[in-house]
Image (spheres, rainbow, N blue to C red):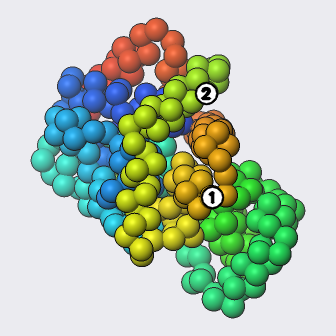
Amino acid sequence: MPIDQRPLALFLMGPTASGKTALACTLSDRFAVDLVSVDSALVYRGMDIGTAKPDAATLARYPHRLIDIRDPAEPYSAADFRLDAVAAMQDITAQGRVPLLVGGTGLYFRALQQGLSQLPEANAAIRERLSAEAASVGWPALHARLAERDAAAAARIGPNDAQRIQRALEVIELTGRPLSEQQQGGSGQRFPWRVLKLALLPADRGPLHARIAQRFDAMLADGFLDEVRQLRARGDLHADLPAIRAVGYRQAWEYLDGQTDAAEFRDRGVFATRQLAKRQITWLRGELDARVIDPDCPGFDAVATEALALFLGSR
């Protein structure tokens, strides 16, 4: 059997608040790895507190590529990420080091490794009609329609995620096929790196839920609402932008619009983060080739270190 000569890469995946960043930094102290962020919110500048972005001191010691590369007014897609991530990985590999991709955005990991199918361009007429329907009956009703037509897509899309519900229904109308089916198509090309996948999956969600609540409260204490006020003060951002629809920011925007009170805002922010973690866990359980590690077990970082040492030694 021929030896796999592809260069090596590591995917460190896990739900929000599972300790990915801390573990990535620990691994970079031990191995010749460079970090690449795989997070759809960390790409945006000026969105620091609510995204739990590593602070300046951490980023100075442990640089992460693909953080702070977009203004919140600019769109950023899985296709954009794939181009940027491949370029970063090629550069890291050329320097004789190993790219360590760390984050929780499953669509980005999938797009990177499997490629993207050729989906149809946006159709303004369909989008306007779907938006008008949502204004009348609500996005959860359209989410229910999506569940009837594409259960797999609906399972990983939140009932109020307007942008993704709209896109999934739009693709179905334009092609007559479920979005989830088309996303599995990929590019058909072999991924240029040999990958070790480490998935931080808690066996008990209780500690994870507690960390999510504690972190959200810490964000509030650190000035999260002031951060959102500064974004609103720019005047060019609105609630329908992908950046502002990020978990936490959407709830904060609604609170500052007067749609909720402080207690409800906090509860909705925590709940939305827990729902995000649930979707991330569901996706990770489908990554059958990943080495699963419980981040709440003592010595989990040693398990990850040993796995990476064996992987790098196999070169």
Q: In this rendering, is residue 84 above or below 306?
A: below
Q: Please say whether residue 285 is visible from this viewpoint.
A: yes
Type of the residue with mark 1: Gly
Q: In this rendering, is residue 308 above or below 145?
A: above
- In the picture, the quarter occupied by the C terminus is top left
Identified at 64% across, 39% down, the residue is 263
Q: Residue 182: image x %, image y %?
A: 65, 67
Name the residue carrying label 1: 258
Identified at 45% across, 71% down, the residue is 237
Q: Which residue lies furthest to the top in this view?
A: 298
Q: Which residue lies furthest to the left in this view?
A: 95
- In the picture, the quarter occupied by the N terminus is top left
Q: Nearer the viewer, mark 1 or mark 2?
A: 1
Type of the residue with mark 2: His
How many residues crowd mark 2 within 10 Å: few (<14), some (14–19), many (20+)?
some
Element class at badge 2: helix
Give the side of residue 6 with respect to residue 141, left or right: left
**C-alpha gap between disc 1 and disc 2:** 27 Å
Element class at badge 1: loop
Task: Tell me, for residue 141, which label it has, or none.
Answer: none
Q: Which of 176 and 129 is in front in this view?
A: 129
Give the side of residue 262 with respect to residue 125, left or right: left
Circles 1 and 2: CB atoms closer than 8 Å: no
Name the residue carrying label 2: 209
Q: Which of 250 and 96 is in front in this view?
A: 250
Identified at 31% across, 39% down, the residue is 54
Q: Residue 196: image x %, image y %?
A: 40, 35
Q: Residue 275: image x %, image y %?
A: 66, 42
